[in-house]
Image: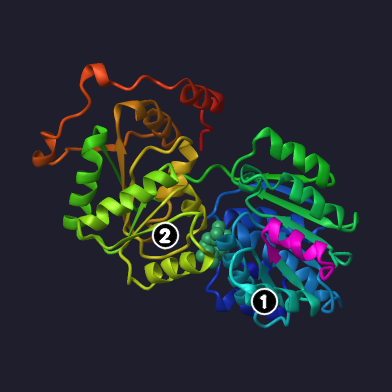
Amino acid sequence: MTFKDFNFNDDLFQGISSMGFTTPTPIQEMAIPVILNGQDIIACAQTGTGKTGAYLLPVLDVIGKKDNKHHTSTLILAPTRELAQQIDQQVEGLAYFTGISSIAVFGGGDGSAYEQQRRGIQNNVNIIIATPGRLIAHLTSGVLKLNHVTHLVLDEADRMLDMGFYDDIMRIVSYLPKDRQTLLFSATMPGRIRTLAKKILNNPEQINIAISQPAVGIDQQIYRVHDAQKTPLLQTILKTGGYVSTIVFASRKEIVKSLTRELRAANLKVKAFHSDLEQKEREEILLDFKNRQLPVIIGTDALSRGIDVEGIDLVINYDVPGDPEDYIHRIGRTARAETTGTAITFVNHRDERRLKSIETLIEKPIRLMEVPDDLKSIEGPKPTEQPTKKRSNRRRWGNKGTPKKG
Ligand code: AMP
């Protein structure tokens, strides 16, 4: 199948070609005809599958054909400013020859950003890509009118609910015409997503693509370590591994911050990426990272979904992610676009069960590496100091059930 088979408008087709897309990805093959047919969809798809194109292309085609260039006809809700900006960049590329306008609307930034968003909204920009909180601010200020919206997209709906946006979403939906097409995309499908879908979708077609297996180009490795060995091992890998662009993932913001301090003290050029930073700082960090001015970035799972940078050659999991699917998201930051990369995971004794679940999901054992000799003597906790297993951890893990198979 090629993009020609969808019979898109010529100017949209030109945009697709200029973006270098030749064949549709599986989610695009499945979703585009259904969306062109006017149906609502609920789609389970991860970042990296081409999900953004799967909804943007048919929506751009439909709104491009109608004479509605003077209204805001499409609203795309996304959990984070980074994702909103990435979607906006894809709109700009794909819609370049169509004359369709778009703006990303998100919180943070200075007053001038708010003003710019307000002006865009006042000029009836065709597509608004927004984080829910900031959109509500524009709605309540009375500037934004959503009564001509024909297409509503919720991107990474599970993450929006995780971030507490349920009420905001419902409030935004109350401003929209009932007669609209609604497209919901989510990486996971917990019960609360289905509940949300029941409320805001109309007889949706369900589209599932199996959880993507890690790209074949990723060399996956684990080190069995105790906590005291983790930072020295990380330093050794960063200093001697010869990697150009590295992302280190840690489970919590506090670990991200303290680890960044320790690595800096060891003269490594690293920066932390977390939700406490101002938007400008986050953008600067990502830009430096993309431009290879910054070799190492340390962040939480929020970074695993948003970042689309080519040429990352190493991903390190400082700890094992709680959800095996998060492991695939994290390591999927390397070996993008058919290149190769390395993904290294540090596993302590408490994380063994999580590792097992990951190996079940990816259907193979991960290669065990030997801790360098000079780090072997670093002592782990004495038997009496072994941390007791936390009940909450067990419960969370137990609740997830058996991981889905690919
Ligand atoms: P997404 O899953 O939407 O975040 O897309 C991941 C990456 O794949 C983005 O950099 C897109 O530009 C790219 N992409 C999306 N669709 C295609 C396609 N059909 N062919 C090649 N690249 C694509």
Name the residue located 28 percent from the left edge and 21 percent from the top edge. 386
Q: Say which residue label 2 marks.
A: 336
Picture coordinates of residue 360, whole percent (x, y): 42, 30
Judge: label 2 CB < 8 Å from ligand 1: yes
Q: Say which residue label 1 marks.
A: 95
Picture coordinates of residue 383, whole percent (x, y): 22, 17
Q: Amino acid at mark 2?
A: Arg
Q: What segment is highlighted magenta in the picture?
A: 129-144
Q: Residues within 10 Å of mark 2 (few under 14, many from 20)?
A: many
Would you say residue 49 sits in the magenta stretch?
no
* Residue most extreme to the front: 111
Color encoding of the figure: rainbow
Helix, strand or loop under label 1: loop
Picture coordinates of residue 275, whole percent (x, y): 51, 54
Q: Can you tell which quarter of the image residue 126 is in?
A: bottom right
Picture coordinates of residue 406, whole percent (x, y): 51, 38
Judge: label 1 CB < 8 Å from ligand 1: no
Q: Amino acid at mark 1?
A: Ala
Q: Can you tell which quarter of the image residue 228 is in?
A: top left
